[in-house]
Amino acid sequence: MVMGPCGAVRPDGGCEVRAHPVDVADFRDIIAPPPDWSSRVEVVERELHRRYGHTPELTEADEQSGRIGRLLRSGQLTSQVILLRAASPARA
Protein backbone atom coordinates (compact mmCIF):
# COMPACT_ATOMS: atom_id res chain seq x y z
CA MET A 1 0.00 0.00 0.00
CA VAL A 2 1.05 3.57 -0.68
CA MET A 3 1.04 5.99 2.24
CA GLY A 4 -0.95 9.20 1.83
CA PRO A 5 -2.22 12.02 4.05
CA CYS A 6 -5.07 9.85 5.34
CA GLY A 7 -2.88 6.85 6.10
CA ALA A 8 -2.56 3.88 3.79
CA VAL A 9 -4.18 4.38 0.40
CA ARG A 10 -5.80 1.19 -0.91
CA PRO A 11 -5.57 0.22 -4.58
CA ASP A 12 -9.21 1.34 -5.02
CA GLY A 13 -8.21 4.85 -3.88
CA GLY A 14 -9.90 4.56 -0.49
CA CYS A 15 -8.20 5.35 2.78
CA GLU A 16 -7.22 2.99 5.53
CA VAL A 17 -6.50 4.60 8.87
CA ARG A 18 -5.47 2.49 11.82
CA ALA A 19 -7.16 3.69 14.98
CA HIS A 20 -8.25 2.43 18.36
CA PRO A 21 -11.39 3.35 20.29
CA VAL A 22 -10.87 5.71 23.21
CA ASP A 23 -14.49 5.91 24.33
CA VAL A 24 -17.91 4.69 23.21
CA ALA A 25 -21.25 6.28 24.08
CA ASP A 26 -24.74 5.06 23.33
CA PHE A 27 -27.04 7.84 22.18
CA ARG A 28 -28.88 7.60 25.52
CA ASP A 29 -25.59 8.39 27.32
CA ILE A 30 -25.11 11.69 25.53
CA ILE A 31 -26.17 14.75 27.49
CA ALA A 32 -29.05 16.90 26.30
CA PRO A 33 -28.11 19.75 23.97
CA PRO A 34 -27.89 23.28 25.36
CA PRO A 35 -31.22 25.15 25.69
CA ASP A 36 -30.63 27.33 22.63
CA TRP A 37 -29.84 24.34 20.40
CA SER A 38 -33.41 23.94 19.11
CA SER A 39 -33.66 27.57 18.08
CA ARG A 40 -30.31 27.37 16.27
CA VAL A 41 -31.43 24.20 14.46
CA GLU A 42 -34.67 25.93 13.43
CA VAL A 43 -32.73 28.89 11.98
CA VAL A 44 -30.53 26.56 9.91
CA GLU A 45 -33.48 24.46 8.73
CA ARG A 46 -35.44 27.59 7.74
CA GLU A 47 -32.49 28.84 5.70
CA LEU A 48 -31.96 25.45 4.04
CA HIS A 49 -35.62 25.34 3.04
CA ARG A 50 -35.53 28.95 1.82
CA ARG A 51 -32.55 28.20 -0.40
CA TYR A 52 -33.12 24.57 -1.39
CA GLY A 53 -36.72 23.72 -0.48
CA HIS A 54 -37.60 23.24 -4.14
CA THR A 55 -34.93 20.58 -4.71
CA PRO A 56 -35.60 16.85 -4.65
CA GLU A 57 -32.38 16.36 -2.67
CA LEU A 58 -33.66 18.36 0.32
CA THR A 59 -37.06 16.68 0.11
CA GLU A 60 -35.34 13.28 0.22
CA ALA A 61 -33.04 14.37 3.06
CA ASP A 62 -36.07 15.51 5.10
CA GLU A 63 -37.82 12.19 4.48
CA GLN A 64 -34.72 10.22 5.47
CA SER A 65 -34.26 12.33 8.61
CA GLY A 66 -37.84 11.64 9.65
CA ARG A 67 -37.43 7.92 8.95
CA ILE A 68 -34.22 7.72 10.99
CA GLY A 69 -35.85 9.64 13.85
CA ARG A 70 -38.80 7.24 13.94
CA LEU A 71 -36.50 4.20 13.90
CA LEU A 72 -34.37 5.62 16.73
CA ARG A 73 -37.42 6.44 18.85
CA SER A 74 -38.90 2.97 18.30
CA GLY A 75 -35.65 1.23 19.23
CA GLN A 76 -35.41 -0.50 15.83
CA LEU A 77 -32.22 1.45 15.18
CA THR A 78 -29.53 2.37 17.65
CA SER A 79 -26.58 4.68 17.34
CA GLN A 80 -23.24 5.08 19.01
CA VAL A 81 -20.63 7.78 19.08
CA ILE A 82 -17.14 6.30 19.00
CA LEU A 83 -14.13 8.44 19.81
CA LEU A 84 -11.13 7.10 17.90
CA ARG A 85 -7.48 7.98 18.17
CA ALA A 86 -5.13 7.29 15.30
CA ALA A 87 -2.73 4.52 16.19
CA SER A 88 0.90 5.49 16.36
CA PRO A 89 3.13 3.68 13.83
CA ALA A 90 4.31 1.40 16.66
CA ARG A 91 0.71 0.32 17.35
CA ALA A 92 -0.37 -0.07 13.71
Image (cartoon, helix red, strand yellow):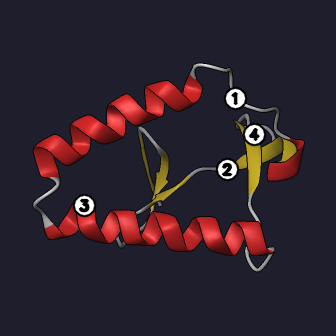
Given this view, does label 4 or label 3 mark the residue nearer the observer? Answer: 3
Which quadrant of the view contains residue 56?
Answer: bottom left
Give the spatial CA distance, label 2 vs label 1.
31 Å
User: Disc 1 residue type?
Assistant: Pro
Q: Residue furthest bottom?
A: 76
The disc, 2 or 3, on the residue closer to the chain's N-terminal end is 2
| 53 displayed left or right of 16 | left
User: Percent from the top left, x then y, of residue 6?
Assistant: 46, 43
Mark 2 nearby-residue class (10 Å; few <14, some 14–19, many ≥20): some
Of the two numbered discs 1 and 4 in the rendering, the one whose residue sits closer to the viewer = 1
Would residue 29 be found to the left or right of residue 90 on screen?
right
In the rendered structure, which disc, 1 or 4, sits on the residue that comes first in sequence? 1
Q: Which mark is residue 18?
A: 2
Image location (x, y in percent) of residue 1: 47, 61
Mark 1, residue position: 33
Q: Are marks 1 and 4 in contact (CB under 8 Å)?
A: no
Other-residue count near label 3 (Cα within 10 Å), few / some / many at <14 / 14–19 / ≥20: some
- Mark 4 touches mark 3? (CB < 8 Å): no
Element at label 1: loop
- Mark 2 or mark 1: whose residue is earlier in sequence: 2
Distance from Cα at disc 4 to Cα at disc 2: 13 Å
Category of crowding for the residue at label 4, using alpha-carbon neighbours closer than 10 angstroms: few (below 14), some (14–19), many (at least 20) = few
Above or below 6: residue 73: below
Q: Which residue is mark 4?
A: 83
Q: Residue at x 55, y 31 (%)?
A: 38
Camera-side residue of 11 and 64: 64
Residue 12 point in image, percent of width and height: 35, 72
Q: Residue at point 75% right, 40% down?
A: 83
- What is the tally of numbered marks visible in this picture? 4
Query: Of label 4 and label 3, which has the lower sequence position?
Result: 3
Marks 2 and 3, Cα distance to the nearest angstrom?
34 Å
Q: Is residue 89 left or right of residue 63?
A: right
